Amino acid sequence: MKDEACGWAGEEALMAPQRLSRRSARGASVCASEGAAAAVLLSVDLMSEVLARYASLTRGWGVEFHLAATVCSVWRSAVALAEQHMSEWMSHEWVVPRISKLPDDGAHLLPLSSTGPYDWELVVYPRLSLADRESGEPRAVIGLYLHIPTCLSESEPSDQPPRAWARRAVVELTVHHATSPHLDRRKFFRHLFTPEARDRGYPADDPAGSFGAVEELTTAGFIIGDVARFSARVRVYPGRHVCSAERISHPLLREDGLRPLIARAYGDFSFICDLCTRTLPSSRLHSCSRGCNFDVCDDCVAASADELSTEEGTAQDPERRCLRGVRLI
């Protein structure tokens, strides 16, 4: 059965040979272009490439991206394929010279190299003063925060972020040792970025959770010649639906690389189940597959596995769903 919305493209392609016989060489060239365009429009792989390019050009803000899914089943599949590629791990790197001379109130830095369509800045505070949670004494440490830029160029108003934008992100933030990669210091977090919460990093509120002070990092060989190197591995999931004990909005995933990722940053760790609130070893961890800061133990998964109800999303809101209990993937 042919999609009505895609029918015009297929019919145009079929009519191309007739037009070629009636037109001049110039007209034939035009028809060939139309046939090629029709082939692109009816190919899932090619359309997904076009959509991925559009996402890159609009820096991930293209509000028309999901509307393409309303055209026909081919475009709907292309949107899903492009989203799959866009939710892979992306890397961003910053090399910061004269780090000790940065302003104390923070510097917003663009990455030296970056992959993926999404824009990120790193906000660096060379001397962030926070009170130690135990002693109460102030300590000056380096502050590193991943930040979403305010907006796109004012010359491109059609590509401005939508008013109610949101991104869930899984992030591994790294301070690189100048000569010994095995000494790299890593932090891990999951965060829902919104217009009201557009940055996240370390330390949160206690200097004990920081990467250290500039002086200490220099002595330890992380900063050489007043130059530091930072990187972020980021996995983005567009949408603002968040899993909670009241509503599990996304499937849960056990073997998604989350445990080794956290262990690489913090060593052996335990987690608190967001349903039963018990503290348990990481071997019993199930986490949200779409980037929510939400973890469930295997006991709670077993108790809720048969209570599932789903509602398909729409092109305008592909996340819209209502789940009871837990789905595993």
Image (spheres, rainbow, N blue to C red):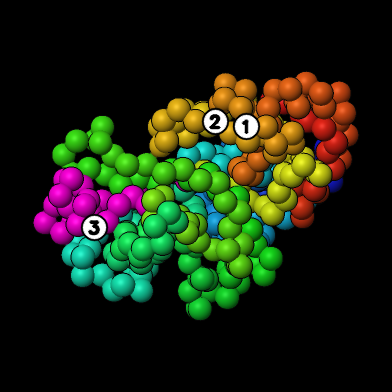
Instruction: State the separation of the CA atoms marked 1 and 3.
Output: 34 Å
Q: Amino acid at mark 1?
A: Thr
Q: CA distance from mark 2 to mark 1?
A: 6 Å
Q: Nearer the viewer, mark 1 or mark 3?
A: 1
Q: Amino acid at mark 2?
A: Ser
Question: Is residue 27 or residue 146 the one in the foreground?
Answer: 146
Q: Is residue 71 left or right of residue 41?
A: right
Queried whether the magenta region covers residue 49, the answer comes back as no
Can see residue 245? yes
**Residue 114 vs residue 67: left or right?**
left
Given residues 40 and 312, the one toward you in this image is 312
Whether residue 75 is situated above or below residue 95 in the rendered picture: above
Find residue 159 and report its horizontal and vertical position in percent: 58, 68
Instruction: Tell me how far mark 3 sits from mark 2, CA to CA.
Output: 30 Å
Asked if the residue under mark 1 is in contact with the one under mark 2, i.e. CB atoms within 8 Å, the reply is yes
Question: What segment carries the magenta color?
Answer: 210-234
- The residue at which mark 3 appears reads as 214
Mark 2 neighbour class, 10 Å CA radius: few under 14, some 14 to 19, many 20 or more: some
Q: List x then y, in percent, for residue 202.
A: 42, 54
The verdict on residue 226 being magenta is yes
Q: Residue at x 55, y 46 (%)?
A: 190
Ranked by sequence position, the earlier of labels 1 and 3 is 3
* Above or below, comparing residue 78 to residue 154 in the picture: above
Q: Is residue 40 left or right of residue 151?
A: right
| Disc 1 target residue | 279
Which residue is depicted at the point 65% across and 55% down?
65
In the picture as drawn, the residue positioned furthest to the bottom comes out as 154
Q: Nearer the viewer, mark 3 or mark 2?
A: 2
Q: Which residue is mark 2?
A: 270
